[in-house]
Image (cartoon, rainbow, N blue to C red):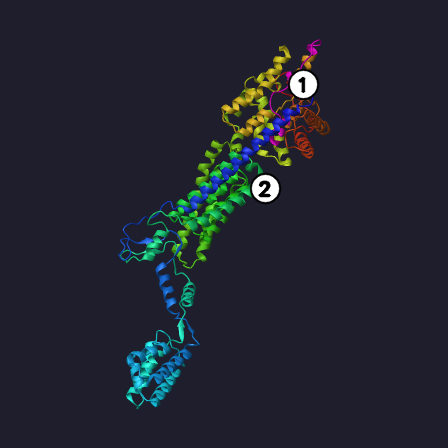
Amino acid sequence: MTENPGLEKIRELKVAAAWRDWHWRRWLFAACVFIALTLVLVVDFFPDRVTGLQPGKPSQKTVKAPRDIQVIDDEATAQQRAEAKKTIGKVYNRDLGAEARSIEGVHRVFSAAGKLKESQLTPDDRYKIAVQEAGDSIARVGFDKMTALTYDQLAEAEGRVAAILQRLYSEQVTSDDLAIKREKLVKAAYESAGDPVVNQVVAEVGSAHLASNYLFDKAKTEQLREDAAADVKPVVIGKQKGEEIVGEGKIVTNAQIKLLREVGLLGRRVDTTRATGYGLISFAIIAAFALYLHNFQRKIYDNGRLLLVLAIIIVGTVLIAKIVTSFSMLYLVPVVAAGMLTTLLFNVELAIGAVIVTALYSGLIAGQDFRFLLIWLLGGLFAIYTVAHIKHRTDLARGGFLVSLVIGGLAIAMTFISTSLSLEEMASNLGWGLAGGMVASILTIGVLPFLEKVFGITTDIRLVELSYANQPILRELMIKAPGTYNHSVMTGNLAESAAELVGANPLLARVGAYYHDIGKIKRPLFFVENQIGGENPHDHTNPNLSCLIITSHVKEGVEIAESEGLPKEIIDVIKEHHGTSIVSYFYHRAKENLVKEEVCESDFRYSGFRPRSREAALVMLADSVEAAARTIAKPTPNRLEQLIKRVIQQKLDDGQLSESDLTLKDLDRIITSFTQILISIYHTRIEYPLPALPIRSANGNFAK
């Protein structure tokens, strides 16, 4: 029967809406992680506050830099730029017409004096006419002296003035040295031994007409001075982490105040430039890691619960790194713990990415110190190796010890390449390195159970613990349903062997098989493997009721598993190990008993889910194959192989494997694996002759 197209369309729309909703929530989640990590980078959690510091007064305490820092000394920079401006002199532009204008003015004055010399006009009128013709460059007293001279004296004075001006204009005459040049002119005028009045006229006329032949260019001068100041680089004051900024009893400078304010010791302040840089780097790291998850860790990328666990590990590691770095305990930065936790909770590939991300963030926090960045990276990668295949929690201590030795060795190596090599420093670094590894292992041992429990993550360590026969449920199964227990162990061996060939989790397949039939604890005698020579209660039970009893062990097993707090992966195996298979024995019995009535096949099927994982599918196949193999009277390799193929083909034809990831090639590998295991169990044995029983003689002794 074809499904309603409208219902199919509605289902598709619901799936698309759910995906879009998760898509936006995932972006929001990534933004929150980015903001959290950036805030950890930017905010100073434990600033060493200082109070009472004032420029020009002594400091009451010694303050050291909590991190590497560089600031610009504004005062020193301004002083150097002012000095650079002073090196640039005034810029002058030559006035090529200045000399000609001065000489021409001299000629006009002497020409006017010659014309008006013998005029009958009053002195005042003559001066007015002279001013109109020659300008007011000559004072009234000087003009009267000129008109008192003879024509020869006027000619002599005119020639001398022109000669002195030409000599002075051969040099640079500016507004700044104009007074000095006039003094030279007057001195040259009075050097002549001639008529003192002529000398006086030469001095006055020449002084009146001497002007600057180089004019000050203010705009160009200012531009050159600004350029010179701009060429001066800012004076940068740098302090390394731990270096003294202010010494006790020393006078505090403005530059030191700025350094203290820059690192937040004189009040909480966020450096926007530094925060922007950290934000961009943080965004690049998060974006790269998100792309890695999207392309290579899709299972985790699509699971909000797993993403939250991963975010807790990364943000928590960076947060602890910020705290321990504030107290200069860099060897205790828990990048190693992040690698261990991610390996145990997820996988090795993701752990490598987590180590790189946490190491990069920790390196930024530590002031971009490449030495510790190398220690964290190498230590984290080695830690991944040490815990990649552990199955017991006690092995974490051994892994932590090995990591401690590695970090201690790296610490000594970094001591060798440092500038200050000393035995004391080597011993200190070795001690801190060993402590860092042990703290990482302790942190991992403490946090791992919490993350497992709260977020329902099943690690291999947890699976190994569940596989122990002293587990309460398995012990109860062993006592109440020994046949089922033995069957579960055999099923686990089959599933584990096949899982290794098809890329499933062998440990999960084996442990899932151990628990898949725990529901039979409730009514063990209704299952044939527990009926050791006894009466079968189904012989006197209605087939429908028998089917209900048989199929209920799945539901009851889930209830037991949930009450005991078993992992979700194990519960899923219990739910799915029969899928929706038909209970064929009771179905056929019902058909035989009710010849005239129609028997509904769906009433004799399990009401669970088809296997949705490889491990659940393997348990289903191993369960059916192991049970069927017990029915073969004389098992041979060929009979066992044909039986396995027939069982798997039935499951395949019944659609029980349609939701698992198993391929036909995987099924061939499973058949091969099952066959090898069952052949090793049911191999043909040699029939040894029974030993002869001793015969008692008449006297009571045994005959030889």
Q: Is residue 425 above or below residue 19?
A: below
Q: Which residues are magenta?
A: 592-620
Query: Considering only vertical position in the picture, is 414 above or below 138?
Result: above
Sequence order check: which comes first, mark 1 or mark 2?
2
| Quarter holding residue 159 | bottom left
Q: Quadrant of the C terminus?
A: top right
Q: Report the amino acid beneath label 2.
A: Asn
Q: Is residue 691 magenta?
A: no
Residue 76 placement, left or right of 584: left
Quarter of the N terminus within the rendering: top right
Single out the residue that lies furthest toward the top. Answer: 596
**Which picture quadrant has residue 296?**
top right
- 96 vs 430, nearest the viewer: 96
Q: Position of residue 516 (x, y in %)?
A: 58, 25
The disc placed on residue 295 is: 2
Report crowding for label 1: few under 14, some 14 to 19, many 20 or more residues within 10 A (C-alpha).
few
Report the amino acid beneath label 1. Ser
Which residue is found at the position 55% from the left and 28% from the top?
Answer: 570
For the question of whether residue 50 can be seen, the reply is yes
Q: Which mark is residue 369?
A: none
Q: Nearer the viewer, mark 1 or mark 2?
A: 2
- Residue 249 lies, in percent from the top left, at 26, 57
619 in magenta: yes
Q: Which residue is mark 1?
A: 584
The secondary element bearing badge 1 is classed as helix
Q: Is residue 467 above or below residue 54?
A: above
Q: Are marks 1 and 2 in contact (CB under 8 Å)?
A: no
Q: For residue 490, say whether it is visible.
A: no
> Of helix, strand and loop, which one carries label 2?
helix
